[in-house]
Image (cartoon, grey):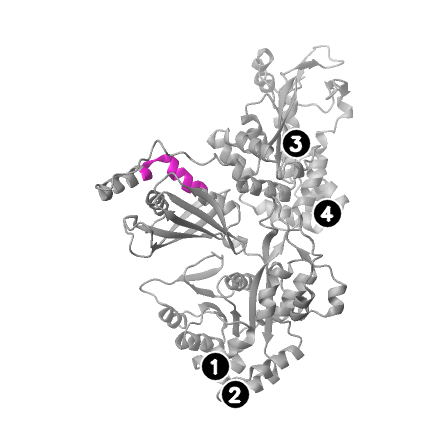
């Protein structure tokens, strides 16, 4: 029956073995019908491998599987038991031979012989023929040999969830709804316990491929349910077999639900080991030998694996929860608090009260380069880099000596900024700009010269807006240079200059003039020198991005004027000034209608009475998926685009800028103020009245 002797030899030993296949059942052999030789076809591991080979080939490439590597089964009639034990003939099974046709060089012929799954996507209008042809062309040139699915998603921007829903349906993977697990500490603890039971190699593989144990079915034989957003990836079955269960079933979960489940695994304090007990390892030192014993205690602490593991886990938790900063704050000799800044607000994450604070601070400082753990009287800056969930994350450390109640304790505050890659910077559409503001901003950044000024307080998202704009206009034909201190996001296609003790801001700007730039991002205009150079760059054929600290867009013109910039330069070099703030968004899962409205406050905010009566305002509640009713942040923007009338107002200025005249003209041209932008978010249910009150009253 087999035309290749090597295939018979390959499974000769398996006939007598007690090995188990991936679903936990022993290898079985059935006889061919109508075959006098009574040759046997293995139905367990062998048949499963044939199907997996077909699936992987069908999804991975546009080329069919190699016929020479598979047994000839196309002209035989045999029986294979289905999941209910009933015999099914080979003619009733999907034919493998259809996908095993030799490749052709003609693209149109290849398109006519597409894998069945790609054909399914075409029939359901998820993709079109042009996208298929483009994906196949990319695949032929791709050194990494990515699957067609990955090319469609990553290069051609096809909706990932839509594609993998069809994947799950086409290959009969059940879909899991993880909502029942959200907030259930017992189930979350089960997932984390089993995930950490894996060998380190398989644990890293599971994290990288987004694979989680989900639940256990017990019906005679234990069967573990394993979930993943990509059930067809070959590594999924490897991880599933690594769990200590005879049976494992792979199911599909959407990427959004997986990310939410992963976030809850990191968020749930109940999943932590209850705090690490160091009472046996660390003892208090005597007062008489304080200094020498303290140094010895710190050395022991640093060398102790549990303390280092604690600090590393804090760094990882900070990344997974989406925190922007980690604050390490010693409150007493034996009490250290870890705070995460999430959505702009500090949240107490963990407290360690059984280890000397100086020991923990020393370990934290040892995690970074360029920090001296014995230096306790100076402010220091350091950095570190880790790979978390298959993503390179950089950490910027800053230390500052602080006063403690006990003068013998030399305490320091440490703040760790989490710097994610430039890939996390989304496009302008995700920032929350209204259509009018977005149109003005897009037109301004696509000009070949002029200056774009972003204003707002520290932490208002100015850098994110600048980098999002640069990613919109990035082009190999442009020399884009940024001057930053520090470099927070790495952007492909940009030359990013980091300031240091030998290269200050003024020197970098002067050197920039001789570096043939097309687009320049110069950070903040701090004084007359930096502002003068930035304006000169914009006036000599360069596009310049810069920032200022002002309350609104109009004030930025006054600030530059007061720095000594000539009115004619201001009038003809500024393309647009954008003022911005960040507001917390209400959690969509738990927000509720605010029935207890303060009408006087609403009127003071400038909301019309008719709008108040016809609008539902929402307030925060709080659930497992958010922090006190809020989740994520969104920007509010005010874009001042220069017009001919505004330039005339600036040119006529003598001792001061007429801000009222500029504001009147801007509103006449359709400018949406920060106040109005905040009110629009509240009336549309995106944020709460409490969140916009400060902004609205300030403006």
Q: Quadrant of the N terminus?
A: top right
Measured in 3D between alpha carbons, the distance from the residue under mark 3 to the one under mark 1, in whole angstroms, is: 70 Å
Say which element carries label 1.
helix
How many C-alpha atoms fall within 10 Å of the one at disc 4: few (<14), some, or many (≥20)? some
Visible in this render: residue 114?
no
- Which numbered dot is residue 634? none
Q: Quadrant of residue 235 in the image?
A: top right
Q: Does the magenta stretch include residue 304?
A: yes
- Above or below residue 415? Residue 265 is above
Disc on the earlier residue, 3 or 2: 3
- Which numbered dot is residue 126? 4
- Magenta highlight: main SS: helix
- Above or below residue 240? Residue 632 is below
Q: Are marks 2 and 1 in contact (CB under 8 Å)?
A: yes
Measured in 3D between alpha carbons, the distance from the residue under mark 3 to the one under mark 4, in whole angstroms, is: 22 Å
Q: Which of marks 3 and 2 is in front?
A: 2
- Which numbered dot is residue 54? 3
Visible in this render: residue 144?
yes
The residue range painted magenta reads 301-313
How many C-alpha atoms fall within 10 Å of the one at disc 2: few (<14), some, or many (≥20)? few
Say which element carries label 2.
loop
Say which element carries label 4.
loop
Q: Is residue 499 magenta?
A: no
- At 66% from the left and 62% from the top, the residue drawn is 681
- Which numbered dot is residue 653? 2
Disc on the earlier residue, 3 or 1: 3
Disc on the earlier residue, 4 or 1: 4
Q: How many labels does the image show?
A: 4
């Amino acid at each position: 029956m087999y035309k290749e002797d090597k295939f018979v030899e390959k499974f000769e030993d398996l006939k007598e073995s007690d090995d188990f296949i991936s679903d936990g059942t022993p290898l079985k052999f059935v006889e061919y019908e109508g075959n006098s030789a009574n040759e046997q076809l293995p139905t367990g591991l062998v048949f499963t491998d044939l199907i997996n080979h077909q699936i992987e080939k069908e999804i991975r490439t546009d080329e069919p599987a190699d016929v020479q590597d598979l047994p000839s089964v196309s002209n035989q009639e045999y029986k294979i038991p289905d999941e209910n034990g009933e015999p099914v003939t080979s003619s009733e099974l999907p034919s493998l031979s259809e996908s095993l046709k030799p490749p052709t060089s003609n693209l149109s012929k290849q398109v006519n012989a597409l894998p069945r799954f790609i054909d399914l996507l075409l029939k359901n209008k998820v993709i079109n023929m042009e996208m298929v042809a483009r994906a196949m062309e990319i695949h032929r040139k791709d050194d990494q040999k990515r699957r067609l699915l990955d090319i469609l998603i990553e290069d051609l921007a096809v909706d990932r969830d839509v594609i993998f829903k069809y994947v799950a349906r086409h290959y009969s993977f059940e879909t899991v709804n993880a909502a029942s697990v959200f907030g259930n500490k017992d189930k979350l603890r089960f997932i984390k316990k089993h995930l950490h039971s894996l060998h380190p190699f398989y644990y890293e593989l599971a994290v990288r491929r987004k694979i989680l144990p989900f639940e256990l079915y017990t019906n005679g034989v234990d069967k573990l349910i394993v979930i993943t957003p990509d059930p067809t990836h070959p590594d999924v079955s490897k991880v599933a077999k690594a769990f200590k269960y005879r049976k494992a079933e792979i199911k599909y979960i959407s990427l959004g639900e997986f990310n939410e489940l992963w976030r809850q695994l990191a968020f749930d304090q109940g999943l932590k080991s209850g705090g690490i007990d160091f009472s046996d390892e660390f003892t208090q030192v005597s007062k008489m030998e304080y200094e020498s014993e303290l140094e010895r205690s710190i050395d022991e602490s640093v060398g102790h694996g549990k303390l280092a593991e604690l600090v590393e886990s804090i760094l990882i938790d900070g990344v997974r929860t989406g925190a922007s900063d980690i604050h390490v704050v010693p409150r007493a000799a034996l009490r250290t608090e870890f705070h995460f800044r999430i959505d702009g607000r500090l949240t107490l994450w963990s407290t360690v009260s059984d280890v000397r604070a100086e020991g923990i601070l020393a370990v934290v400082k040892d995690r970074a380069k360029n920090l001296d753990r014995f230096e306790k009287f100076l402010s220091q800056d350091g950095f570190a880099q880790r790979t978390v969930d298959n993503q390179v994350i950089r950490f910027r450390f800053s230390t500052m000596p602080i006063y403690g109640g006990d003068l013998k304790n030399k305490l320091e505050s440490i703040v760790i900024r989490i710097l994610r890659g430039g890939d996390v910077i989304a496009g302008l559409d995700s920032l929350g700009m209204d259509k009018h503001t977005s149109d003005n901003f897009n037109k301004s950044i696509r000009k070949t010269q002029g200056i774009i000024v972003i204003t707002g307080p520290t932490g208002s998202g100015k850098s994110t807006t600048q980098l999002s704009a640069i990613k919109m206009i990035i082009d190999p034909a442009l020399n884009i240079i940024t001057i930053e201190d520090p470099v927070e996001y790495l952007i492909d296609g940009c030359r990013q200059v980091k300031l240091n003790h030998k290269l200050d801001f003024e020197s970098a700007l002067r050197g920039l003039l001789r570096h043939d730039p097309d687009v320049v991002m110069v950070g903040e205009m701090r004084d007359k020198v930096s502002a003068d150079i930035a304006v000169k760059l914009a006036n000599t054929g360069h596009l310049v991005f810069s920032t200022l600290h002002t309350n609104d867009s109009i004030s930025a013109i006054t600030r530059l004027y007061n720095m000594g910039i000539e009115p004619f330069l201001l009038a003809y070099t500024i393309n647009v000034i954008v003022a911005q703030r960040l507001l917390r968004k209400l959690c969509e899962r738990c927000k509720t209608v605010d029935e207890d409205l303060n009408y006087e406050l609403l009127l003071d905010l400038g909301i019309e009475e008719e709008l108040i009566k016809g609008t539902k305002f929402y307030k925060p509640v709080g659930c497992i998926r958010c922090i006190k009713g809020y989740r994520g942040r969104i920007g509010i923007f005010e874009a001042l685009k220069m017009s001919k009338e505004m330039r005339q107002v600036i040119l006529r200025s003598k001792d001061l800028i007429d801000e009222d005249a500029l504001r009147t003209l801007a509103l006449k041209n359709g400018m949406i103020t920060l106040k109005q932008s905040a009110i629009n978010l509240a009336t549309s249910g995106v944020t709460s009245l409490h969140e916009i009150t400060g902004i609205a009253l300030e403006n």
